[in-house]
Amino acid sequence: MEITISPLEQQEFQDLLTISAVSDETKAVLQKQFDSNAIDSHTFFSLLYILREEDRLDREMQKYAAELANFDPVAYTQRLKEVVEGEIQKYLAAKAA
């Protein structure tokens, strides 16, 4: 039973392949196979999943890089100390009551 590939999925594949970090040679081979319908639906969806994951990971890394650029280790350590101290004090107060 052949699974139908929607035009939106085809476009998503094209878009993700364009921005993928894979080599231009690999892109060309995949594009040629895609254009000639040489990729079966199972392989297509496997490749689409890989490209989606690459895109998701790339976006996450960009987000984390931006967060790291704004990261203040001194402020983080101070805030962590305050939170831990507060939680321990709650515990001690409850035990004393």
Image (cartoon, helix red, strand yellow):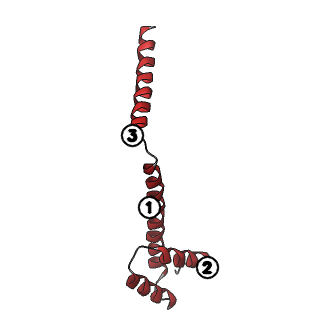
Discs 2/1, front? 1
Amino acid type of disc 3? Answer: Pro
Q: Position of residue 77 (x, y in %)?
A: 39, 34
Write down the quadrant of residue 23 in the picture. bottom left
Name the residue carrying label 3: 73
Disc nearer the start of the sequence (3/2): 2
Q: Which mark is residue 33?
A: none
Q: Position of residue 28 (x, y in %)?
A: 43, 86
Which element type, helix, strand or loop, lies under badge 3?
helix
Q: Position of residue 4 (x, y in %)?
A: 57, 79
The alpha-carbon separation of the residues under discs 1 and 3 comes to: 25 Å
Name the residue carrying label 2: 7
Name the residue carrying label 1: 57
The alpha-carbon separation of the residues under discs 3 and 2 comes to: 48 Å
Disc nearer the start of the sequence (2/1): 2
Residue located 46% across and 77% down the image: 42
Towards the viewer: 58 or 47:
58
